[in-house]
Amino acid sequence: MPTKKSSSVNYNEIPKNIRRRPFYIIAPGMIILIGIMIPFVLAILLSFTNFSFKSITWHFIGLRNWISMLTDSEFYHALLVTLVYGVSATAVQMVLGTVVALLLKKDTFYSKILKVLFVFPLMVAPAIAVLIWQLMTSNTVGVLEKFLNLFGVFNFPWASSYRTSMFTAVLIDTWVNTPFILLLVLAGIQSLPKSPFEAAQVDGASAWFTFKTLTFPMLKPFMYIALLFRLMAALQEFAVIFSLSKGGPGDSLMNISLTAYMTAFKYSRVGVAMPYLLVLWLIINYSAKAIVKRQRKLARQAEGL
Amino acid sequence: MNNKNEIDSKLVSSYNKRKKRKVLGAVGRNLGLTLYAVFALFPLLWMVLCSFKPDTEMYTTVFRFHPTTANYSAVLIGTDYFKAFYQNFVVSAFAVLITIVAGVPVAYALARYQFKSKESVAFTILSFKFAPEILVCLPVFLIFQKIGLYDTYFGLIWVYQLVTMPLLIWVLRGYFEDISVEIEQAAQLDGYKWYEIFLKTLVPLVKPGLVSVGLLAFIFAWNDFTFPLILSGSNIQTITITSLRYLASDTVHYGQVAVASTIAVLPEVIGCLFIQKHLVRGLSFGAVKG
Amino acid sequence: MAQIELEHITKTYGDKTALDDISLCVRDNEFFVLFGPAGAGKTTLLKTIAGIEFPQKGLVRIDGKIVNHVEPLNRNISMVFENYALYPQKTVYDNIASPLRSRLHRESEEDVQKAVVKVAKMMSIEQLLDRRPGELSNGQRQRVALGRCLVRTPNVYLMDEPLAHLDAKLRHFMRSELKEMQSAFNTTTIYVTHDYTEAMSLADRVAVLNHGRFEQTGTAHEMFYLPSNEFVAKLFGEPEINLFPAELTAEGGSVRLKAFDGEVTLTPCADVVPELEKGAKKLDVGIRGNDIGFSFQQEGRDWIRGTVYANEPIGNKVVMTVEALGTKIRLVAPNNTKAELDQEVYLRFNEKNFIYFDYETQKFIVRSDMDRYLRS
């Protein structure tokens, strides 16, 4: 064995071929992921141009798009619609999902079957869900229409009236997405330790008290995760609204996503549409970070229990 | 002894009260569950019912009608709906396959290796899930037009990675973290090379999770609306877009609408039955271990 | 067969130091035992030798060659993990056969079967070959892990508490099997345990590890009779060695020990006095349980009075804990000793077997008749 000068090799450094291994295996994945990041960068760039499908040339126009957006009432209306839709849909789903999850807590034959069946709406594509509900609410052949007729309500406008379109959209969104909350909260309930609840029972606590001081705090981390996913999705919801009414009637459902789409494709002003989307992205990003931070804190607290 | 009788009767009455409360509770609970069950499941039932209802009876009957398969034959044979179904399947399946091949190693690397920017890389991957799809779509539309990927299988499959990859990476990372490192170390001492260990030992261990997440990713890809809407035209029609056609046209063929929905929903409803065990873990991106 | 050397190994995890400047030489074909409390760094040490852990400082040598950069699979080492690390989806047979099926050590299926069956018989698990690890008890899993390690004959066996979850009879049987295998195959073995009787019966040499450092290295005999400090003394021997502080005084021309706040005066043996006088006056005196005489009557004026605190028969002897002089003293009594709680009992120490430690540093100073122990 030829003697090597050990001073030339650092034996306490991991050899290069071993250090390189992680990079070999993540290479293909990283390529794809970086490929996905390119559009984001492009979006930011485009927001500073007057790119349009109508004209062949385009050039940088600085902050003009941004300023015109911030001074356009259409933007603020879109912001309002986005927030109203996002918050109300999420809120309704959180409450409904939690309540049903609590009802499913008891392990009976009925609940076991329902647990499996309740997931189905979640699997349905939002566009298809709109189809199904349109079938049901159709003023001519819909079963819901016939049902409401029994109560003397005729030709309920559902998605064709300015006043009721938001309600309809939130309703369909709730139908599809409540099972998500349901599943998460149920998983949380099933993972809770039994002893605090048994102690509370022995101490004679009422059901509401047990819920308020024990169940709810311990479920908070799970609810925060559900909240995170739902809110982020609801704020940028596109498929449901587009399939339902393309944003109408009027601009009752024109949230930021819809507005941007229309601006870019109907009115062919792509550069103008970008700032809308970037604002939406910022809102979502910061809300997500805030929620995640709170969730982490709560999760640590809940473990202490 | 009056005392003993008093105590006895008190015990009996409190026991009865408790039993009453329990029964009331059970009744209330089942009532609530049934109400929600009607809300959640009736629309699906109605859709299937309508798919067998002949157009002539649409306006007049509700539940009692003469079932027919005319709607099914009209849709499946008469239109190119089946082509849309097939294309949707192809795009989703290939997207998931590529995600698995490229994403599983990334999930493993995130689970096992330590490097400085690990958490921020992981978070960036997660943030893709939250990005508005339109935000990505518009620039991608322009790029695709330029490089000719508009309305192609390859283009759609590439973009679908935005939907499937973060899910797969985050969930599988959790599954890899659950495997004890010592199993890999034991395999090393047994004489296996690192890639042999990965393929022959680790991947089989995460296989159940991988299959479930793969199915879930397939369902998400299948359901996607925004990407096919903007990035594909006449060449590739996914089911979600095709259904738009049914919505737009003031169609009188409600039965066919119902058929379209039923067929669109069938694969995912069946698929979700297979992933029951890992469903919560998949949906929450590994945050909740159902 | 191989000689293992560690030169100034330091291993840290973040700001936690697991191994602190460890140097060790395990001779070829030696049965070397690593002994110490939990968290001392024994597993880390084994893993560093195996190549699974990478040391921040220092060199690892096998047969004189530096192997820091040699991957575990090329070091020709077999290891038993404390947590078994069995492949969950493979059968017991496949688990044990695994080392012989890798590209590096591949053998024909016939030879594999012979080897596996032989090892399985030795571990008494041949009836479990078709099961999966999930269906086995902890003791059975441990035997499978041992089997997987022993199915090959590598340079070195590394064993991390391989007998911890076996019942006493099987443990005893396995101990002798291991020793025999090791000498028959000329394989160096490094063995981790926290059971001192195992260490004493199996080891050619022992090293006591504490907080990442060696407290003492030597034969088990040396650990027991000439512990380098109080920590080592307490680790070996059951019941635990009794330690009490004492002060060296001169009384009327002769050297005495005053202990227990001056209540008891003891006379050190003449041969230790010169060594004792060299150092500090404050000492810790150690005396083992079987060097304490007892009686239920006061046999002599210098016998110490105490009361029985606990009396535990443990098979072939009785451990009696006596409360005396404000402290608890443990001693060994013959098998049939019966005592009532709080019964009066009188103790007498055998000064010949006192072990003297420095009170401040807790290091060993001297014991009587040291030559005899050094020689053997």
Image (cartoon, coloured by chain):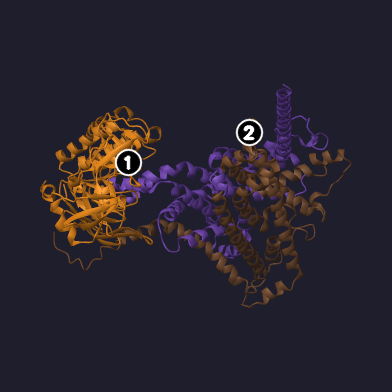
Chain colours: A brown, B purple, C orange
> Residue A61 is drawn in which quadrant?
bottom right
Residue C45 in view, yes or no: no
Which residue occupies the foreground of this view, B78 or A255? A255
Q: Are tags 2 and 1 found on a single chain?
A: no
Which residue occupies the foreground of this view, A279 or C294? C294
Name the disc covering residue C368, or none.
Answer: none
- Residue B114 vs residue C374: left or right? right
- Residue C241 vs residue A231: left or right? left
Secondary structure under tag 1 reads: strand
Which residue occupies the foreground of this view, B257 or C239? C239
Name the disc covering residue C306, or none.
Answer: 1
| Image: B289 above or below A251 | above
Residue C278 in view, yes or no: yes
Looking at the image, the residue that sits furthest to the top is B1
How packed is label 1: few (under 14 Cα within 10 Å), some, or many (20 or more)?
Answer: many
Q: From the image, state whether disc 2 or disc 1 is nearer to you.
A: 1
Quadrant of the drawing holding the N terminus of chain A: bottom left
- Residue C295 vs residue B223: left or right? left
Disc 1 is attached to a residue of which chain?
C
Residue shown at the point (59%, 65%) measured from the top left: B139
> Residue A238 is drawn in which quadrant?
bottom right
| Image: C296 above or below A294 | above
Please state which amino acid type lies under the numbered disc 1: Gly
Q: Position of residue B21 (x, y in %)?
A: 73, 32
Disc 2 is attached to a residue of which chain?
A
Please state which amino acid type lies under the numbered disc 2: Ile
Judging by the rendered image, the residue that carries numbered circle 2 is: A113
- Residue A31 vs residue A188: left or right? left
Q: Position of residue A261 (x, y in %)?
A: 68, 62
Secondary structure under tag 2 reads: helix
